[in-house]
Image: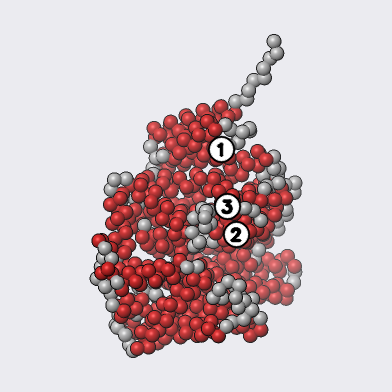
Amino acid sequence: MRKLTGFWDKFVKVLSVALILFQMYTIGVRQFSDIIQRSVHLAFVLTLVFILKPMRKGKCLDHVPWYDILFAVLSAACCIYVTMIYSTIVYQPLQWVSSVDKLFAVVLVVLILEASRRSVGWTFPILGIAFLIYAYFGEIFPGMWRHQNFSFNKIFQNLYHNGTGIWGTMLGLSAVMLAMFSIFSAILAGTGGAETFIKMGQRIAGKSTGGSGKIAVIASSLFGMISGSAMGNVVATGVFTIPAMKRAGYSSEWAATIEAVSSTGGQILPPIMGAAAFIMAQLIGENYLTIAKAALVPAILFYISAFIAIHLVSSRDKIRGENEKPDIRVTEYVVVLVPLAVFMFYLLRGYTVTMGAFWATLLALLTYAVCFIIDTKDLKTALTSTGKICFSTCIKGSSSIVEMCGILAGSQIVIALISLTGFATKLSSMIVALGENSVFLCLVCSMFVCILLGMGLPTTAAYVLGASVLSPALITLGVPPLAAHLFVMYYACLSALTPPVCVAVFMASGLAKSNWFKTGCLSCMVALPIFVIPFTFCYNPALLLEGSASQIIIAVITAALGVVFIDICTVGYLRDKVNMAARLMLLGGGILLLLPQYLPSLIGFVVGSLAVFFALKKRRPTVNQ
């Protein structure tokens, strides 16, 4: 990001405030039509991208070069022009109004791909260019991938002059739901959410063995479900938790590992979860609360796994808890928990996520001001502080919106071209053909594709791409839609931990000054049980709380035991070092317990229990004769 001063700094701040006011007004006061809402939203975002993000890292960081000014003006013009020809797009789609349309269509596609490159790297530009070539030269491709060539006009009319092109679902999510959620998250962060969550973690687990590590798990899980970003979570909480863990005795690698794993899991933790869950609700047409309910048990298993691994490592390395518990004022709880309660209240009453976040945001500001007055007895200072919070929320919220929209606008171009060429249908057919012999093999392939898609991409982008090409195939093979989408989402999240490109690990390693590759391997080791859980709920929907009470109870108990056995195996410690034979028995028993059938689970329980018994059994001292 550029460090701007003078005119450009003021311009960015004014534009950021205008973007937040536009979002709040059009979400909570007066709704605009879809295309107008999305085009104005994109105009704001692309302008900010080209002003704030340099073309190359380390270049032009203190000023805005002429070409970025030109890009910003052109992108705004291309988007605002859409509002002028709105009626034509609605009533006469796929028809040029003039030659200006053609020019703006090409320019906007190029600028969106460039903006996404500056936001998340080369993934979307490469995919966009590849699918443009595939659409234009379809007849040269062999076999099932061959299709009739689409003309230049057909391609760009579909992208620019069609509600399912650039202005489609992904940009719609960015312009309404995710924009509002970004503002809500910024408000909670600005009113001290991260610090309060850390204090809560200190009070809950601070004095136990490995207290600082468990504090990191609690704080990162609570803040992560709000931020929806593993990287953002690492930065927000890791600056506090990682130094505390290192002071307590954790190595740099283990401190970074605990923070990376904890921050990654926050994205799948109900009741709020991350942005990908909101997108999932839109894509599969399910109520958001249905998704949150289904994700509850796997998320709990994730954090059971993290807690057990941390406890065993702390016991092995003799890392004690903290001596003091911090005091938390009632007002600190109120500032964070009341807006969350209001958000949940609106969801439970059947309102949309967007409206819940809108009213929770307004109440968060009001709650902060009232609590500040109670604490300080100073009305003027409270109003001044609330005003500063509003301003910082505009800056942070707009930054989050810019990042999210840069991702989703680029992904929308790729998705539109995938739909136009029928690529997703062809790929799904190929996966289905593979899965006719083995659904398990199909799930394994899908897992690796999700992890590959997630390398270097935020969870949201990885999930969007994975859901567009993998979920339909899994559903065709008989996997329930909700389980199929959650499967893709879980591995999109876990890709933040898997080397060689593991963004959460990179960020945590930078803060801890650790070896990133060793940290990545330790992170995968700690999260190993969670790499198995998505396979389990695809075969056994009881883990998604679907089925009879007895089925759900048995599935949860066996899965929890399986997670415990695998954690003991990966850490290799239980009161004392566990030998390799016992560790292999624990691994096998844990995996068998995660299988949906009763007999394998019973065998797994027996094998794992025997391994635990041998690990805990102490040698009797020999008696001298």
Q: Does residue 331 appear to the left or right of 54 in the view shown?
A: right
Q: Does residue 363 appear to the left or right of 109 in the view shown?
A: right
Q: Amino acid at mark 2?
A: Met
Q: Which residue is mark 2?
A: 507
Which residue occupies 71% across, 47% down? 248
For the residues marked 3 and 1, what is the alpha-carbon distance in whole angstroms?
A: 22 Å
Q: Amino acid at mark 3?
A: Phe
Q: Residues within 10 Å of mark 1 (few under 14, many from 20)?
A: many
**x%, y% of residue 517?**
57, 52
Of the two numbered discs 2 and 3 on the same chain, state the one appearing first in sequence.
2
Which residue occupies 71% across, 69% down? 373
Q: Which dot marks residue 568?
A: 1
The reply to whether the C-beta atoms of the residues labelled 3 and 1 are less than 8 Å apart is no
Q: Is residue 457 above or below residue 553?
A: below
Of the two numbered discs 1 and 2 on the same chain, state the one appearing first in sequence.
2
**x%, y% of residue 108?**
42, 80
Nearer the viewer's eye, disc 3 or disc 1?
Answer: 3
Q: Secondary structure at mark 1?
A: helix
**x%, y% of residue 604?**
45, 33
Which residue occupies 62% across, 81% down? 63
